[in-house]
Image (cartoon, coloured by chain):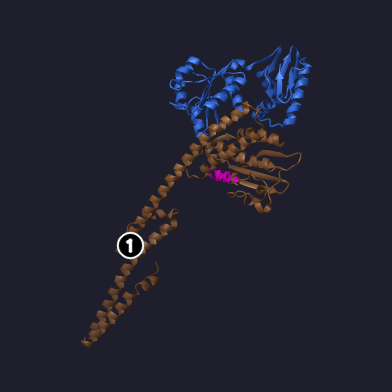
Chain colours: A brown, B blue
Amino acid sequence: MKLSLYLKDKRYIVILSLINFITITLILLAFKLSKDAIIVIDVILVFNFILILGIDYFRKKFFYNDLFNKIEQLDKSYLVLEMINKPDFYEGNILYQALYDINKSMIENIKIHEEQMKDFKEYIEMWIHEVKVPLSSLILTFNNHKNIFNNKTKRQLKRLENYVEQVLYYVRAENANKDYFIKEIDLSKVVKNVGLKNMDDILDNKVSFKVENINYNVLTDSKWLEFILDQIINNSIKYKRNIRNSYIKVYALESEDKISLNILDNGIGIPQSDINQVFDKTFTGTNGRNNNASTGMGLYIAKNLCKKLGHKIDIESKENEYTQVTITFAKNKYFNVLK
Amino acid sequence: MQKIMIIEDDEIITQELKDLLQNNGYLAITLTNFNNALEEILKEKPDLILLDINIPYMSGELLLQNLRKKSNVPVIMVTSNNQETVEALSISYGADDYITKPYNPNILLLRIMAVLKRSNMNSNKLIYHDLEINLGKGIIKKDDKEIILTKNEMIIFSYLLNHQNRIVTRDELMTDLWNNEEFINDNALTVNISRLRSKLKEIGYDNIIETRKKVGYILS
């Protein structure tokens, strides 16, 4: 609170008081009071005026400064009412009450939305679990009657499965709740599961799947990591080049404070103009436009999941040469101490 | 023949699962009355149970808890919920393994085989005619002669041996190899099988692995 602005706000009181002061002085002069008496009365008038304004100024200054400081300090500034003392002057009280009411109505509003989000999320999760039942029975039926169905059916089933998984993890990644469960897991096991899941696609596309130096333990949620890897490997298969020695190489590297998992392929790569946007929602880019199966969601969800798990995910690529995705896990010394 | 009980409330899945298991040499039975599931399990004495978590009357988890008070029969939990916490909980209730829907049928079969193998350790020793097979060392012995198999060749041979007299598809062999972290391609599988054949020939077993065109292989 600035004194100059405060005084500007109180200008009518200042002007009226000045007129008041001059009028009283003139009246006193008209009554022919001694000069000394007039000076004493004037000094008292001026002193009282300053005192009244001063007290008012400091009471308000104390409250408003406190309010704004705390708003600045809090990262959730809407909680500021919990932090300040109720003001002891009337206008402040009005402001305080107004803020309180606004806050309350806002919180109620957010609560309604949160409930709706929660219901929606629960419904989606339930729906996904239900849709997996007919999906499972389709896969089993396909497997038992391979003479009737061909590999196209299998590919469509795989696509269906992947889209269902994407929805599930999208909901999990967007939601504020902690659905994950972090523990120490073996990278080779995750890579094996993802490899098995994509085995048919990898073999059908004549891509060789190389896994090297993968025996590390990292702290993560294995199901989430499987989904992330699945998206990356799906892309590697989808965007392979038509050359004879296509490969996907999965390997890990360890440094002092982190372990990185790398997925390298010699596919068509990503144009420089697109590389910074591949993690953006629904971004499909040049490659996606040439491939109608692209939704632009896989890497976006993968990035969000990494963010929640506290892993770093990066991508580098050179067109017509390679693409490499790197997931970096921090080593946690504290966890080792606890063990 | 080993008896596997399917506890699952979806009729089509139950039927297809039954077909799958029977095609793979197991005796598959289904639970008909969910009302007194526990009694029926104890009466049927299966060698393994495939237990779905979402079943009528009581949840699979509860059934498993009650079952564990009375029996140590191996149980593989099946569910469409793929959360890490649900898995950890199932294992803590005494499940031997956990698989999520939709699963790859070949992988389900591998898991069943692994759990069954763990539960009766004595069948660990593999024997084929007069051959003595050492899985861990990758050695096959006949009298004083022996051949050394690579890891891949051993995986293929033991899979064929576990499914003797039945056609084994390339897909099944491939799944088992990848499940053992040997991520080979089609050509490599062909090469591995022909090497395995020539090694077996060295000890006098010629043409025991037959090729069935467009279907797979059979160990006679």
Specify the farthest residue to the front.
Answer: A148
Could you tell me if residue A257 is visible in this image? no
| Residue B93, position as x, y percentages in the image | 48, 26
Magenta span of residues: A299-310
What is the three-letter code of the residue carrying label 1?
Gly
Taking the spot 49% from the left edge, 44% from the top edge, the residue there is A175
Secondary element at image label 1: helix
Left or right of B91 on screen, residue B215: right
Q: Residue A310 is drawn in which quadrant?
A: top right
Instruction: Name the residue tied to disc 1.
Output: A92
Q: Is A136 situated above or below B123?
A: below
Give residue A35's quadrant in the image: bottom left
Whole-percent x, y for residue A235 in the image: 65, 42
A314 relative position to B36: left or right: right
Image position of A225 (left or right of B60): right
Q: Main secondary structure of the magenta part?
A: helix
Residue A249: image location, x then y, percent: 69, 39
Question: From where the camera sits, is residue A280 visible?
Answer: yes
Considering only vertical position in the picture, is B185 above or below B41?
below
Q: Quadrant of residue A10?
A: bottom left
Give yes or no for residue A308 being in the magenta stretch: yes
Bin the neighbour count of mark 1 within 10 Å (Cα to Cα): few under 14, some 14-19, many 20 and up: some
| Residue A235 or residue B27, whichever sits in front | B27
Q: Position of residue A253 (x, y in %)?
A: 65, 40
Disc 1 chain ID: A
Quarter that holds the N terminus of chain A: bottom left
- Residue A127 forms part of the magenta stretch: no
At horizontal 51% and vertical 42% (from top left) the residue drawn is A172
